[in-house]
């Protein structure tokens, strides 16, 4: 009986020490990783990915101009994000057939050229990139890794570079490749909307952007980025509810 009590006390203290509060939304979540570990994993996974991807690296031509805009939006959003010790970074991936964007732990982001026509301009980019930063700020990638028993086993072994590499590829799976659940999507929307408003981008454009994205999903050609997200009605309703708060912030910060 005594040992049972001790055991449950231990378990409770582990849960408590792993319970985090999400910035902006204030919700509680379970995460076995520290923000520093998010950064180790995110950075490792990102360097593995960018070593093989085709990046837009010059400022010349249409894609070059977009690269500059993508970097500007990133720096605007990062400057109003909560301080978590992240080194925010973005790469524009030269791939017109992929309508996608993601952000790994620690704020390591990829935007694919295929999503640019839907973004149309810097404000549309701020919707997509704010949402993706939302996933990183809420630490959804390592939250999900925390529930994976394979990760728990790897963590119980001594940390070596090899371990970090295998966890790095899991960080990519859980932070970029696998779809997030509906609640994580709506939470990322919430954070993204507030961030874009704080950075001086009109948050009303978020609803308009989602309509553009939604209109592409007819006829069985759902864009990759949209396929993992909640229904348009749910999303629009949630965004409308948050708009008054976002507008206050936007009016105070608009250029
Ligand atoms: Zn998302």
Image (cartoon, helix red, strand yellow):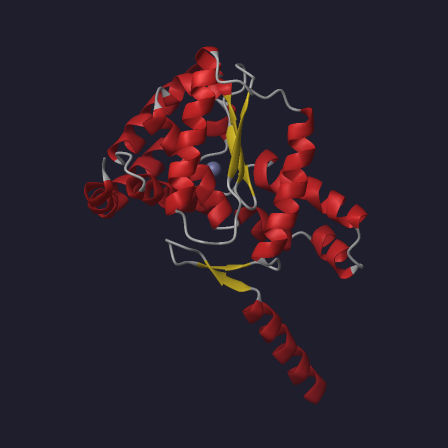
Q: Is residue 65 above or below residue 77?
A: above
From the image, which quarter does the C terminus lie in?
top left
Q: In front: 142, or 214?
A: 142
Q: Quadrant of the N terminus?
A: bottom right
Q: Count how many numbered circles sit on residues in the image.
A: 0
Q: Residue at x 39, y 44 (%)?
A: 79
Q: Residue at x 52, y 33 (%)?
A: 90
Residue 250 on image: x %, y % = 23, 41
Which residue ends up furthest to the bottom in the rendered image? 2
Find residue 105 and report its horizontal and vertical position in percent. 57, 45
Residue 200 higher or lower than 163, as above or below = above
Q: Position of residue 211 (x, y in %)?
A: 32, 25
Residue at 25% x, 34% y: name it: 202
Task: Decide if residue 205 is in sight here.
Answer: yes
Residue at the far front in the pictured view: 59
Tell me, yes or no, if residue 182 can be seen here.
Answer: no
Residue sitting at the far top: 61
- Measured along the vertical axis of the image, is residue 155 above or below residue 180? below
Position above or below: 231 against 14: above
Q: Residue 224, how many percent across, how many down?
A: 52, 25
């Amino acid at each position: 009986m005594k040992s049972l009590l001790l055991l449950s006390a231990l378990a409770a203290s582990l849960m408590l020490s792993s319970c985090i509060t999400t910035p902006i939304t204030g919700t509680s979540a379970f995460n076995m990783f520290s923000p520093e570990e998010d950064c180790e994993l995110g950075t490792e996974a990102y360097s593995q990915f960018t070593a093989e991807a085709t990046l837009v690296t010059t400022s010349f031509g249409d894609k070059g101009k977009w690269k500059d805009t993508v970097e500007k939006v990133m720096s605007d959003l990062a400057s109003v994000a909560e301080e978590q010790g992240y080194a925010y970074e973005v790469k524009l991936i030269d791939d017109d057939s992929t309508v996608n964007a993601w952000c790994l732990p620690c704020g390591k982001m990829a935007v694919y050229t295929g999503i640019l026509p839907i973004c149309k301009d810097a404000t549309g980019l701020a919707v997509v990139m704010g949402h993706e930063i939302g996933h990183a700020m809420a630490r959804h990638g390592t939250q999900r890794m925390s529930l994976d028993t394979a990760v728990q086993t790897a963590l119980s072994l001594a940390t070596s570079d090899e371990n970090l590499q295998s966890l790095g590829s899991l960080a990519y799976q859980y932070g970029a490749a696998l779809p997030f659940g509906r609640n994580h999507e709506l939470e990322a929307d919430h954070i993204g909307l507030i961030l874009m408003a704080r950075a001086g981008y009109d948050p009303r454009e978020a609803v308009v952007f989602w309509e553009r994205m939604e209109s592409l999903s007819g006829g069985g050609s759902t864009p990759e980025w949209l396929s993992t997200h909640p229904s348009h009605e749910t999303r629009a309703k949630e965004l409308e509810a948050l708009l008054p708060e976002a507008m206050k912030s936007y009016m105070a910060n608009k250029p």
